[in-house]
Amino acid sequence: LLLEYAPGGELYRRMQTEKILRESEAAG
């Protein structure tokens, strides 16, 4: 498991942020 993808990793946080933004846009 790459540390970047572990919870707290930079890429993990980036993916979570993008996911939240997409859900927020979908919710309108």
Image (cartoon, rainbow, N blue to C red):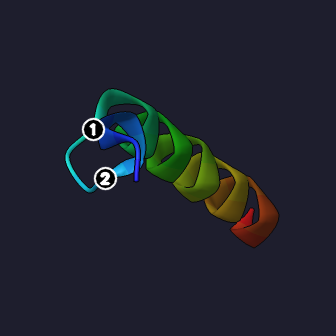
Left or right? Give the position of 2 relative to 20: left
Alpha carbon separation for disc pair 2 and 1: 5 Å
Residue 22 location (% of width, % of height): 71, 53
Q: Spot the residue most to the left.
A: 8
Residue at which label 2 appears = 6
SS class, disc 2: loop
At x 31% / y 52%, what residue is drawn? 6
Residue type, mark 2 in image: Ala
Q: How crowded is mark 2: few (under 14 residues within 10 Å), some or many (20 or more)?
A: few
Q: Where is residue 13 in the image (x, y as percent from the top left)?
A: 36, 41
Q: In which quarter of the image is residue 2?
A: top left
**Mark number for residue 9?**
1
Circle 1: element type? loop
Q: Which residue lies furthest to the right in this view?
A: 26
Could you tell me which residue is drawn at 79 percent across and 64 percent down? 26
Disc 1 residue type (three-letter): Gly
How many residues crowd around disc 1 within 10 Å: few (fewer than 14), some, or many (20 or more)?
few
